[in-house]
């Protein structure tokens, strides 16, 4: 029998890789002073529809429990975060920095890099209105990849801004919220669609006073601006409105301050202004970013942004927030491509084999070493012959094989074979333990 | 909005406790040379019904996905283990020692100690027919509780044997598999039901040649036997059949050998022969055991046993196996009762505060320390006044507060305040890093 499509088995070496990823994420999050939390893997369906509308049900593992309660396997962590913090927003420490490493689910056709069950590293800063939160989160995202040995040759951050795009639409007289949302949605999929299709949609969306072709070309130009000067120049071709220019100037100075912070936080080499990014989720309100593999085939490794209105929408309590999520599937692929995620599956430190009369002594030694946190195996069952036991011991590739013979028992000794250098010596039990302790110190 | 009934939120301190539990389980499993694996949280429904019959569906979170595929959230790990190992049984290393720490689900009324979502520590030894496997697993279960500071005052192992019970029924001429299963089921719930109810069921189950009252009283006697001698005496009152006596003698010597191994593995103080245990699951074939809190109100902390026929039933490939599972809910309750599971929530090592001119210097220092694996926070946002920043820093209770002032910048120094002893000194950045490194060495 197979597992369900889009779900994975983690046999020991895959499990060790997965855990190495989790360990890295957790280590870096703690360095940045984020605290770990978690929520249930299943939530009331309403929690997700409330935030994202009814259409999200099509992308969810949604079902009814036997009490007729509508529930869903969580597709993302943010709604649970809002629900959990929502219980005590009035007394929330500001900023509150939280992370978790969670399994999440989406119901869509499984494909390379997109499974139905996957893990995410989620990090959020809640209660901080200033750009420090964006800088800290982007630095965390960058560091969580650098931790594994990835460099600016492997990935970069594409930094964009929803507010800049809103100002841009305002320059064309477009301020209606639904309309703005529709055009941002178009921008999100812009580069994946032929020009003709985008223009068809624009004709439907744009107010009659805006000429589709003009808008398309000017927007294409803005999308490719890589500097603040280029952005400012692009705007000045469209508008001379003093208020709008002032708002743009203000926002660009904020972007500049964010870039400055990121430079101080040693992320300069990784960050590029890239307005082609707008992010799919409707709830972003400010700076948004994606971490991308370099190269043409690059895939997104993480993404996030500021969402200052979601708490208010769901809890009626205003609360600024910034967050990002990074998935395990694309990251594992990338790390394996560069052999950066070694198979951390550990072999045992010691394998005890013994002549039949020495079994109890060997088992006591096993427990003694385990108490000192060594990983120890011993021969099971019917294998009374030393040579058979040794054969099984070699399969496990331990650091040391310890051999208990009747002959050596009389002088309180054992044979210790080191598999790394094939040396063999006869030592007392305490001396053997000391050898192991020393080895551990060297490795630590 | 609330979470679903029987599901838990893990806010940072609860999450830290949960992770401390996972860390302990993982550490002990590795000492015993078990390798970690994992399977999907959802599996085809058939995987569970095939093993446990259709009636299990009532206890499952079972649902159809949009493709009409019947699936369920896993209620236990064993079926997934069999499915995953089933792919390569012919070449399986023997013994294979596996563990995992998984979230599992059951659909029943939530109550104290029993939730709808819970975590389990599962350990299995596959491919080992000898009693070494039982001894190793029971020792692991005991050690996984001792790791947290629990002793023989807090828990003990109730060791029983399905084969002894089968021999007992054979002494009454009961060998029909369905009948044996029915009576084992009765024995499992024996002490929770009034005598009259048990007798009513026995009348229905027992063959006409067996007198209910005789069977009940003799069985009551056997249930309370605490020694091998008492068990042997109990049998001899019922049967003089030579073949049966020989089989009993053989099995009791195996039980004795198991008790010997457990004594050598330093578990003697923890283990009691207790035939009242038969375990609910139908698939056990030999020794079964439960780890129990001491005292009258004691609850089960873990349970398991040998299941030598399940692999064959599900994969048509014979393969002996022993396993156990321990849950997080009762264990966390017990550990908290004795204050043995401290809140491992870590506070930051350093909080950097700064005069406005010194911000960049403070941020660079932050990143430098984080690279050395210290947990470091710094003042966000608009708090330009040192006193306000200090107030926020104290809320976080870091080990050290590092203060960057313009005055000290000129001589390359910072103020370092140690919150433990309230000392304050002025040092260079490298000296400050050295203080932190030394502190870490002391703690490690």
Image (cartoon, coloured by chain):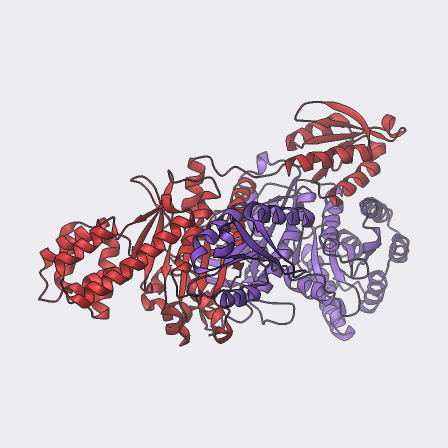
Chain colours: A red, B purple
What residue lies at 36% left-to-right and 62% top-to-bottom?
A306
Res A305 quadrant in image: bottom left
In this rendered view, identify the residue nearer to me: A75 or B403: B403
Picture layout, residue A366 above or below residue B324: above
In this rendered view, identify the residue nearer to me: B227 or B31: B31
In this rendered view, identify the residue nearer to me: A145 or B231: A145
What residue lies at 83% left-to-right and 38% top-to-bottom?
A360
What residue lies at 62% left-to-right and 72% top-to-bottom?
B111
Q: Position of residue A17 (x, y in %)?
A: 52, 42
Describe residue B142's horizontal placement relative to residue A265 as left or right.
right
Question: Total number of numbered labels?
Answer: 0
Quarter the C terminus of chain A occupies = top right
Describe residue B371's horizontal placement relative to residue B134 as left or right.
left
Res B118 quadrant in image: bottom right
Q: Position of residue A29 (x, y in %)?
A: 51, 53
Q: Is residue A61 something that shows in the picture?
A: yes
Res B90 quadrant in image: top right
Q: Position of residue B431 (x, y in %)?
A: 59, 46
Picture layout, residue A361 above or below residue B427: above
Q: Position of residue B62 (x, y in %)?
A: 49, 62
Q: Is residue A33 something that shows in the picture?
A: no
In this rendered view, identify the residue nearer to me: A370 or A225: A225
């Amino acid at each position: 029998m197979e597992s369900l499509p889009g779900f994975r088995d983690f046999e020991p070496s895959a499990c060790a890789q997965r855990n190495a990823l989790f360990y890295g994420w957790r280590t870096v999050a703690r360095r940045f002073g984020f605290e770990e939390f978690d929520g249930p893997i299943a939530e009331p369906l309403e929690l997700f529809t409330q935030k994202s509308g009814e259409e999200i049900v099509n992308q969810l593992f949604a079902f009814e429990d036997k009490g007729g309660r509508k529930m869903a396997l969580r597709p993302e962590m943010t709604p649970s975060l809002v629900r959990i913090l929502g219980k005590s927003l009035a007394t929330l420490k500001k900023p509150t920095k939280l992370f978790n490493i969670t399994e999440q689910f989406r119901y869509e056709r499984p494909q390379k890099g997109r499974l139905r069950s996957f893990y995410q590293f989620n990090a959020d800063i809640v209660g901080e209105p200033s750009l420090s939160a964006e800088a800290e989160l982007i630095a965390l995202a960058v560091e969580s990849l650098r931790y594994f040995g990835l460099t600016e040759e492997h990935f970069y951050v594409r930094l964009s801004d929803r507010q800049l795009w809103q100002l841009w639409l305002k320059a064309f007289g477009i301020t209606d919220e639904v309309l703005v949302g529709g055009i941002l949605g178009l921008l999100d999929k812009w580069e994946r669609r032929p020009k003709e299709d985008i223009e068809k949609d624009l004709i439907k969306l744009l107010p009659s006073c805006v000429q589709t072709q003009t808008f398309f070309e000017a927007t294409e130009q803005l999308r490719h601006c890589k500097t603040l000067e280029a952005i400012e120049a692009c705007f000045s071709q469209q508008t001379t409105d003093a208020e709008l220019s002032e708002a743009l100037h203000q926002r660009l100075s904020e972007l500049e301050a964010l870039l400055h912070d990121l430079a101080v936080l040693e992320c300069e080499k990784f960050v590029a202004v890239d307005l082609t990014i707008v992010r799919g989720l409707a709830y972003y309100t400010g700076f948004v970013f994606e971490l991308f593999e370099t190269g043409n085939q690059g895939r997104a490794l993480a993404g996030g942004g500021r969402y200052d209105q979601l708490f208010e929408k769901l809890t009626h309590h205003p609360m600024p927030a910034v967050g990002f999520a990074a998935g395990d599937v694309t990251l594992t692929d990338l790390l394996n491509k560069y052999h950066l995620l070694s198979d951390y599956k550990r072999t045992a430190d010691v394998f005890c084999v013994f002549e039949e009369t020495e079994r109890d002594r060997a088992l006591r030694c096993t427990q003694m070493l385990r108490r000192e946190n060594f990983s120890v195996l011993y021969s099971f069952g019917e294998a009374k012959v030393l040579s058979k036991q040794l054969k099984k011991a070699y399969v496990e590739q331990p650091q040391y094989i310890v051999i208990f013979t009747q002959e050596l028992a009389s002088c309180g000794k054992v044979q210790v074979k080191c598999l790394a250098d094939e040396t063999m010596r006869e030592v007392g039990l305490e001396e053997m333990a000391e050898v192991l302790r020393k080895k551990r110190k060297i490795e630590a």
